[in-house]
Amino acid sequence: MISQATTFANARWRSEVPVLTGVTVSLREVKLDDAQSLFDLLSAPEVSRFIHEPPTSIQAFERFITWAQDERCRGRFVCFGVVPHGMETAVGLIHVRRLDLGFDTAEWGFVFGSAFWGTGVFAESAELVLDFAFDVIGVTRIEARVAVPNGRGNGALRKMGAVQEAVLRRAFSCNGQPVDQALWAIVDSDRLERKRAPRQRMYVH
């Protein structure tokens, strides 16, 4: 477990979010230049079907990005734009949101343009964000809520080593109809065990 002193030292992310670099992607704080590409990618019906309604205009995305940066400065939220190597703008988002005062428990959420589904971009990006959440922020538990009919999203979390702990009945609105959500969680001991295991490249299908 990360010590309190280490956690305080690692709070530097509140003033400047580090770039997380993988084999095929880099993750950096979402910025205003991403608004156009994110609006184009995430407004597609197949993408927005199982998420809370995304911003409805480029200007609304810009307001969301400004809000995300303000919340990061307050130590409550960090939002990464996922940029494949060779590209300049984000093709997806992964955020981590504080659920308690100490940021011991957090919620994460993710969304990617459909052109990048099944490419391995999510799996690599998610591993980078989990390392950041547990090793830098110092969370001990991270949760996700996914609509039960969203087989792709639930399958992705299972592959990441998350455990489904509950079903939240009629907790999400999908096309105006209430649907159940699955509650998934990864705790620090799960993460340590997974990191000790041999690494395999994972793809979300």
Image (tube, grey):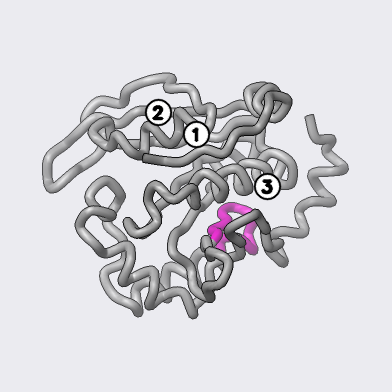
Tell me the amino acid under the disc marked 3. Phe
| Label whose residue precedes the other's in the sequence (3 or 2) | 3
Give neighbour class at mark 2: few <14, some 14-19, many 20+ (Cα, 10 Å): some
Name the disc covering residue 117, or none.
none
**Which residue is more in the foreground, 44 or 203?**
203
Q: Is residue 9 above or below residue 32?
A: above
**Which residue is more in the foreground, 115 or 45?**
115
In the picture as drawn, the residue positioned furthest to the left comes out as 176
Secondary structure beneath label 1: strand
| Image spot of residue 14 (x, y percent) | 69, 60
Query: Which residue: 59% across, 52% down?
Result: 76
Tell me the amino acid under the disc marked 2. Leu
Query: Which residue: 48% across, 31% down?
Result: 159
Secondary structure beneath label 2: strand
> Any magenta on residue 76?
yes
Name the disc covering residue 143, or none.
1
| Label whose residue precedes the other's in the sequence (2 or 1) | 1
Q: Which residue is mark 3?
A: 132
Quadrant for the N terminus, please. top right
> Any magenta on residue 204?
no
Q: Quadrant of residue 156?
A: top left
Query: Which residue: 37% across, 33% down?
Result: 154
- Magenta range is 71-80
Name the disc covering residue 183, or none.
2
| Image spot of residue 173 (x, y percent) | 20, 42
Q: Quadrant of residue 25?
A: bottom right
Give neighbour class at mark 3: few <14, some 14-19, many 20+ (Cα, 10 Å): some
**Which residue is more in the foreground, 25 or 105?**
25
**Which residue is more in the foreground, 3 or 112?**
112
